[in-house]
């Protein structure tokens, strides 16, 4: 593995204040490592050669259930020696959106996607399902580069939202997509002031954002916790596992060969890359990496992309009276503004899905456990603080996943390698559902040499800052979190 592949990026850390984003970097740094529940996902555990660190966890994921992942037919693993024109590693949104755009652009090429478990098994099938309009690092970017540049960046994220709309409407991808906008919710004065600033920034970019309080806020959501909200007409919610499965079927129809249960063990880069899997190998002149929070397991982006975990709960379905009591009639995703913020949203069958409250970093870049009780408890408490009207509601599911973060909170989508033939999209800093769709398009443009505003975006070939060796991070994480909890006041939890 070349040095370039392992450590893409330069040492370019920018100082930040204690903002939510700053914390997530710190929480990157956060929380003690609990080695997770090891009940084993039996379907993937059949091969003793499978590296246990990737797939040992049972995942009680409501989205997986809704997408029928438990009984789904998986594609056969790669066995023997093969050749392709393009190999994609990772069957999450980055890999699948790359497969989608590349298959449309290169109908005559052999494109093979390798996925260790099943498509959507990683963060893509486990997230909160917020189809966020907005790009990680946007507020800072606008401060530095002005509203015009900010608007271009925002439009790049809207491209991802539009892509999901198109997949759902025009390509038969059934994913329960509801384009209901978003609500940023303030807990206390300090947050309300920050919302005013956000509103100004959005408006400076020519975007709509309405600050609401009192009766207007109650008309959107009834919670004694929230003091103000910023209503935003862009973005929506989706069942992410269904989206991944629908995209899998679509790209297969477009001629992409998908190999699930195919864990890549090693990548030997060159003019012809050699990709070694558990049971075979494949060579190709072009490689696409869609591994995000798992990248370091293959020695990629080590000490540039930090695996950070998030956990989610899903309640039982609410009764009509319970929905009326909380008045959440417009069904938009809601996120509060604390450093350790919560995100919550309704599901199509009337449940509430809540995630956040803490974002553990596990020692030595450990992956997320299937679920993690301390965070699940925080989420449950937080749900009933937000909606005391729902006290006693049952929690039916709890799960978690791993995502990639950078120190400056900016993702990177680009091309690297001695022969400029390794394309990648990584580190969406917790906002990858829509943006990974944009990344797939950018990857295709970089490969074809076509240019658009997307391929000129600031994330393209962004050099991710070095974040120090994994071994020291857990200590820094604990210190930083202790500092925040001592001095961060209500903005933290
Ligand atoms: C709990 C949680 C909540 C989140 N909530 C939101 C949200 O509401 N909105 C939002 O925008 N973003 C959210 N995110 C972030 C978002 O899910 C990710 O940014 C996005 O899904 C990343 O997609 P990806 O394809 O790059 O990576 P992944 O989806 O992680 O895909 C990587 C794939 O690579 C496979 N893989 C790994 N190693 C190997 C190997 N050696 N060989 C073969 N295959 C391998 C994995 O099985 C996996 O399927 C959340 C993330 C989590 C964990």
Image (tube, grey):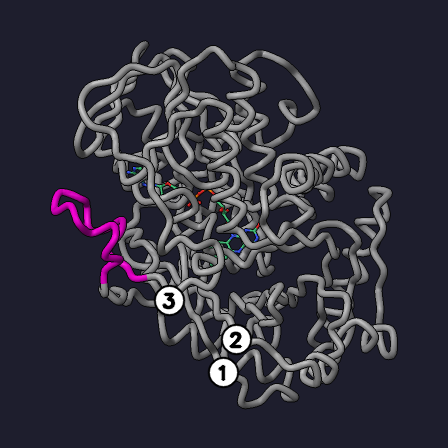
| Residue found at x 71% / y 68% | 185
Q: Residue furthest left?
A: 48
Residue where numbered disc 2 is placed: 315
| Residue 370 on image: x %, y % | 34, 62
| Residue found at x 60% / y 84% | 385
Residue 31 is left or right of residue 408, and the answer is left
Residue 197 is left or right of residue 164, and the answer is right
Please tell me whether the stretch drawn in magenta is mainly helix, strand or loop.
loop
| Residue found at x 85% / y 49% | 203
Secondary structure found at label 3: loop
Mark pair 2, 3: CA separation: 25 Å
Mark pair 3, 1: CA separation: 27 Å
Residue 263 is left or right of residue 295, and the answer is left
Which image quadrant for residue 190? bottom right
Q: Nearer the viewer, residue 96 or 337?
A: 96
Q: Is residue 159 visible?
A: yes
Kindly identify which numbered label has been placed on residue 124: none
Residue where numbered disc 3 is placed: 31
| Residue found at x 52% / y 33% | 250
| Residue 66 on image: x %, y % | 49, 59
Q: Is 419 located above or below residue 206 in the figure?
A: above
Question: Disc 3, disc 1: CB below 8 Å?
Answer: no
Q: Nearer the viewer, residue 199 or 222?
A: 222
| Residue 111 on image: x %, y % | 41, 20
Stretch in magenta: 40-58
Secondary structure found at label 2: strand
Residue 54 within the segment the image draws in magenta? yes
Sequence-earlier tag: 2 or 3 = 3
Q: Quadrant of the N terminus?
A: top left
Q: Is 83 located above or below residue 372 in the figure?
A: above
Residue where numbered disc 1 is placed: 394
């Amino acid at each position: 593995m070349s040095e370039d592949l392992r450590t893409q990026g330069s040492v370019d850390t920018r100082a930040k204040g204690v903002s939510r984003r700053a914390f997530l970097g710190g929480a990157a740094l956060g929380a003690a490592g609990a080695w997770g529940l090891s009940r084993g996902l039996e379907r993937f555990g059949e091969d003793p050669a499978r590296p246990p660190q990737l797939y040992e966890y049972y995942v009680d994921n409501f989205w997986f259930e809704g997408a029928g992942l438990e009984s789904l037919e998986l594609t056969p693993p790669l066995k023997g020696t093969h050749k392709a024109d393009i190999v994609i590693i990772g069957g999450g949104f980055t890999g699948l959106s790359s497969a989608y755009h590349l298959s449309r652009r290169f109908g005559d090429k052999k494109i093979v996607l390798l996925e260790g478990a099943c498509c959507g098994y990683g963060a893509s099938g486990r997230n909160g399902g917020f189809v966020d309009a907005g790009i990680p690092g946007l507020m800072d970017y606008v401060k530095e580069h002005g509203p015009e540049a900010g608007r271009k960046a925002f439009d790049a994220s809207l491209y991802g939202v539009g892509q999901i709309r198109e997949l759902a409407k025009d390509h038969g991808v059934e994913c329960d997509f509801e384009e209901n906008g978003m609500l940023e919710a303030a807990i206390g004065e300090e947050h309300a002031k920050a919302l005013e600033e956000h509103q100004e920034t959005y408006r400076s970019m020519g975007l709509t954002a309405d600050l609401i309080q009192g009766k207007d806020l109650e008309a959107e959501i009834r919670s004694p916790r929230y003091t103000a909200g910023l209503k935003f007409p862009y973005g929506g919610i989706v069942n992410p596992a269904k989206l991944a499965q629908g995209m899998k079927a679509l790209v297969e129809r477009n001629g992409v060969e998908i190999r699930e249960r195919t864990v890549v063990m090693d990548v030997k880069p060159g003019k012809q890359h050699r990709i070694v899997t558990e049971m075979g190998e494949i060579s190709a002149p072009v490689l696409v990496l869609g591994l995000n929070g798992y990248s370091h397991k293959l020695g990629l982006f080590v000490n540039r992309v930090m695996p950070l975990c998030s956990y989610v709960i899903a309640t039982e379905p609410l009764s009509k009276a319970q929905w009326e009591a909380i008045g959440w009639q417009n069904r938009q995703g809601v996120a509060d503004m604390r450093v350790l913020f919560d995100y919550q949203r309704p599901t199509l069958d009337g449940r509430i899905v809540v995630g956040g409250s803490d974002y553990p970093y596990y020692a030595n870049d450990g992956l997320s456990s299937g679920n993690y009780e301390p965070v699940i408890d925080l989420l449950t408490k937080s749900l009933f603080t937000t909606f005391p009207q729902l006290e006693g509601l049952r929690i039916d599911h709890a799960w978690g996943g791993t995502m990639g973060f950078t120190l400056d909170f900016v993702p990177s989508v680009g091309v690297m390698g001695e022969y400029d033939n390794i394309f990648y999209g990584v580190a969406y800093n917790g906002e990858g559902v829509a943006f990974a769709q944009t990344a797939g398009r950018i990857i295709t443009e970089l490969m074809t040499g076509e240019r658009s505003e997307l391929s000129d975006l600031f994330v393209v070939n962004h050099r991710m800052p070095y974040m120090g060796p994994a071994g020291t991070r857990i200590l820094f994480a604990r210190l930083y979190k202790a500092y925040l909890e001592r001095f961060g006041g209500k903005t933290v939890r």
